[in-house]
Image (cartoon, rainbow, N blue to C red):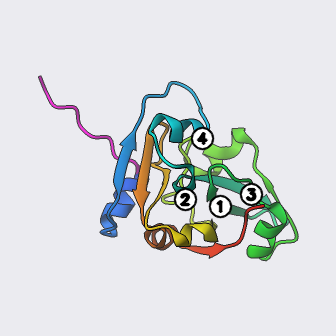
Amino acid sequence: MAKQKEVKTNAMRILESMKIPFQQYTYECDEFIDGLQIADMLSLPYEKVYKTLVTVGNSKNYYVFVVPVAEELDLKAAAKSVGEKSVEMIHVKDINMVTGYVRGGCTAVGMKKQYVTRIDSTARMLDKMIVSGGRVGSQLELSPQDLARAAGAEFADIIR
């Protein structure tokens, strides 16, 4: 029987091309589940698992925020971190059009365009963090500094 070929996402190809080490976790999933459920399925500590959120500012520019899975994005702090008066979450139906990813598989690396990205500063205290791998059913573990480098991101205080 032929060995099943590993399906690489755009994010994985970019990390490999930048020689950034990562570990992939996979899970079975037929429909969207939130990050807390994924962490539970994979027996991962919540404080290491981060979700990727996409917003739009008053300027109509898009911004990406990476925050701990059990926390909420502080929209005022997020807006301030990117020099906007305010930002709001984009509609779920727009995620694919804006990012190239689907809900539950959105990651800050390898979006259709390079958007201004902020990673919550809590990540700086971690050796490794876990983010979506670029598709539903895939998570990637890598250092926060490597994620910031690959996503062109900066760290900021952006949670409540």
Q: Position of residue 115 (x, y in %)?
A: 62, 66
Confirm or deny contact between disc 2 and disc 3 (CB under 8 A). no
Q: Is residue 112 above or below residue 150?
A: above
Give the label on residue 108, or none: 2
Residue 110, magenta (yes or no)? no
> Which quadrant of the figure contains the N terminus?
top left
Residue visible at 44% across and 46% down?
139
* Residue type indicated by callout 3: Leu
List x then y, in percent, for residue 128: 44, 63
Type of amino acid under label 4: Leu
Mark 4 or mark 3, whichever is nearer to me: 4
Q: Which residue is mark 4?
A: 36
Of the residues shown, which amino acid type is indicated by label 1? Val
Label 1: which residue? 64
Write the start and end of the magenta stretch as one range.
1-9
Graded by Cα atoms within 10 Å as few (under 14), some (14 to 19) or many (20 or more), the crowding at tag 4 reads some
Residue 134 seen: yes
- In the image, what residue type sits under mark 2? Ala
Q: Which residue lies under the disc numbered 3?
A: 73
Q: What is the distance, in whole Å, between disc 1 and disc 2 at their CAs?
A: 7 Å
Closer to the N terminus: mark 4 or mark 3?
4
Residue 102's disc is none
Front label number (1 vs 3): 3
- C-alpha distance separating marks 4 and 1: 20 Å
Q: Earlier in the sequence, mark 2 or mark 4?
A: 4
Along the line of sight, the residue nearer the viewer: 92 or 154 = 154
Which sits earlier in the primary sequence, circle 2 or circle 3?
Answer: 3
Q: Residues within 10 Å of mark 3 (few under 14, many from 20)?
A: some
Q: Main secondary structure of the magenta part?
A: loop
